[in-house]
Structure formats: C-alpha cells, structure tokens
C-alpha cells in the first residue's frame, strides 16, 4: 500500500479495528493480502520508528501464511520499543484468533 487513498479508505471504514498498548491494527477485507507498518514521530526518532516497524513486520511475517486475505495496517505505539517478544507474540496470536483472521 503506497497511496494515501488506500490508507484513507482503510482508516475510514475498517472491517476490524483493534487497539493494544503496543499498536493499533486496522483490517479491511480484500481479495489481495497487503500490509503496511506505520510509526509516527510520537514513537521517537527515525531509529526508534524503524525498529518499531521491524518488530511488527517480523511478527506479521511469521503468521502471514495462516492469515486471511485482506489489507492490514499496523500503527506502532511507543510502548512497543520496551515490549517483550514472547508477550507481544502471544498477544498478536490472541487478537488474530478473536478477529477470526486465521484461515
């Protein structure tokens, strides 16, 4: 997802939206599987923002083959920088199960 229109369309009417202390997940049903990872300047300087996006991307890639097709946007929060990998992984699994996004 590169265009502002795509982001706006998903932000305005997501199929699912989920908030945690580490990130916000927006999901919209679609025929394609697309993902985007966003970190605002509130997260920190560029190094911190890039690390936050890398952490979310790594967790998503681990599960990508089991997820339904759709458009996923992960918006990182500052707390993700201090999070434990295992705790975040368990939380992400439970969110995907609750939203019934696993195939």
Image (cartoon, grey):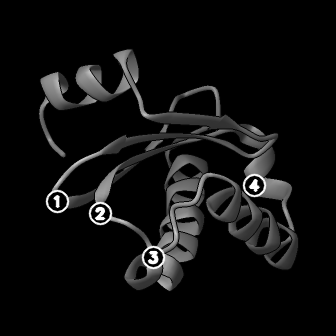
Q: CA distance from mark 1 to mark 3?
A: 14 Å
Q: Of 51 and 60, which appears nearest the observer?
A: 60
Dot in front, 1 or 4: 1
Kindly report which numbered mark, 4 or 3, lies closer to the viewer in this rendering: 3
Q: Earlier in the sequence, mark 4 or mark 3?
A: 4
Residue 4 picture location, percent across and down = 17, 24
Considering only order in the chain, which callout, 4 or 1, is on the residue closer to the N terminus? Answer: 1
Write down the quadrant of residue 7 in the picture.
top left
Looking at the image, do the residues carrying marks 2 and 1 touch, with CB atoms under 8 Å apart? yes
Q: Are marks 4 and 3 in contact (CB under 8 Å)?
A: no
In whole angstroms, how far apart are the C-alphas of marks 4 and 3? Answer: 29 Å
Q: Which residue is mark 2?
A: 69
Label disc, if present, on residue 88 of the rendered structure: none
Reply above or below: 81 against 6. below
Q: Which mark is residue 32?
A: 1
Looking at the image, residue 47 sits to the left or right of residue 37; the answer is: right
* Element type where label 2 sits in the image: loop
Counting residues from the N terminus, which is met first, the one under dot 1 or under dot 3? 1
């Amino acid at each position: 997802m590169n265009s502002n229109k795509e982001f706006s369309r998903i932000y305005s009417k997501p199929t699912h939206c989920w908030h945690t202390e580490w990130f916000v997940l927006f999901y919209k049903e679609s025929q394609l599987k697309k993902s985007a990872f966003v970190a605002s300047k509130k997260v920190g300087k560029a190094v911190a923002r890039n690390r936050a996006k890398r952490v979310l991307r790594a967790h998503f890639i681990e599960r990508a083959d089991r997820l339904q097709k759709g458009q996923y946007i992960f918006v990182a929060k500052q707390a993700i920088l201090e999070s434990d990998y295992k705790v975040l992984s368990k939380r992400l699994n439970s969110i995907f199960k609750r939203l019934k996004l696993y195939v």
